[in-house]
Image (cartoon, rainbow, N blue to C red):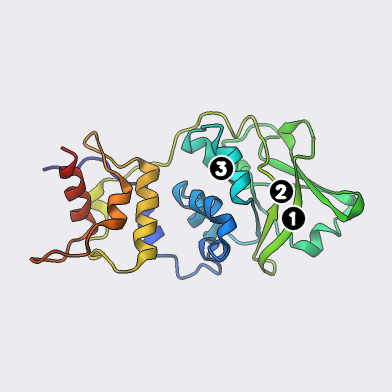
Amino acid sequence: MQLLLAVAAVLSLALLPSPTAAHNITRILEKDPDFSTFNHYLTVTQLAPEINRRETITVCAVDNAAMSDLLSKHLSLGAIKNVLSLHVLLDYFDAKKLHQITDGTALAATMFQATGSATGSAGFVNITDLKGGKVGFSPQDNGGDISATFVKSIDAIPYNISVIQISSILPSPEAEAPAPGPSQINITALISENNASEDDSKKKQISNICHAASMNVEGKEVDPSHLVNAPAHNEDHMMSWKDVVVRMMEKQN
């Protein structure tokens, strides 16, 4: 049976992190379950490997409650990617720098702006020191209203990456507009030597990316949970992940 379409592009990057990466946003965020939803969507939108390849950035993470507010809007996966890319600032802001901004305000470009998807002032975020030691964040295309404030520092590798928590999702009409989802590749591009692993983190990564792509193989939608729960082997031979996908597709015929 011929396989046509399957999981999202850069699967190999998800399975085999670049050895030159000085940081891993997934590992930083997985230490705190409060950021599990944000972390999950960085993976399924394929933003995580993009973040890991960049230097001198700030990731403005939000907790699960704030992510629930975003997901309640029922945006496309492409739009969710644009919204989250607005939360990746292309400059380094740790807690100290945030409270010592020259003239009390700064304008930061974001990964959303760098993709070329944003037009005009969209894709830029204003950072403002407020009274009482608070720091506010507001997207340029949101009328200048302060929509989120700095909560705490999560982790930092000085001048490489700063990961902070902000109070809520940054609203942006342009980022929330319908957008294409992550691209797809042929299932045969899966790394053949990656037999079903006992490494739960690999299974979870594959499941997340399969979920993002909806696993539309020859028009059959494969439940990604099957991949996590699939046996690593049977009595006859070790099953590769490609074999598992085929087996799950056959079950749904």
Q: CA distance from mark 1 to mark 3?
A: 27 Å
Residue 82, percent from left and from top: 56, 40
Q: Which residue is mark 3?
A: 115
Q: Taking 154 as reference, is 207 left or right?
A: left
Residue 108 can be seen, yes or no: yes
Residue 84, percent from left and from top: 58, 45
| Closer-to-camera residue (243/86) | 243
Residue type at numbered disc 3 = Thr
- Other residues around mark 1 within 10 Å, as few (<14) / some (14–19) / many (≥20): some
- Residue drawn at (77%, 62%) of the image: 95
Q: Which numbered mark, 3 or 2, is in the foreground of this view?
A: 2
Looking at the image, tell me whether mark 1 or mark 3 is earlier in sequence order.
3
Residue 108, percent from left and from top: 73, 48
Looking at the image, tell me whether mark 1 or mark 2 is earlier in sequence order.
1
CB-based contact (under 8 Å), mark 1 and mark 2: yes
- Other residues around mark 3 within 10 Å, as few (<14) / some (14–19) / many (≥20): few
Q: CA distance from mark 1 to mark 2?
A: 6 Å
Above or below, 108 against 157 in this view is: above
Q: Quadrant of the C terminus?
A: top left
Looking at the image, tell me whether mark 3 or mark 2 is earlier in sequence order.
3
CB-based contact (under 8 Å), mark 1 and mark 3: no
Q: Which numbered mark, 1 or 3, is in the foreground of this view?
A: 1
Above or below, 83 against 31 in this view is: above
Q: What number is the disc on residue 167? A: 2
Q: Which residue is mark 1?
A: 151
Which type of secondary structure does the marked residue at label 2 adopt? Answer: loop
Which type of secondary structure does the marked residue at label 1 adopt? Answer: strand
Residue type at numbered disc 1 = Val
Residue 92, image quadrant? bottom right
- Residue drawn at (62%, 30%) of the image: 174
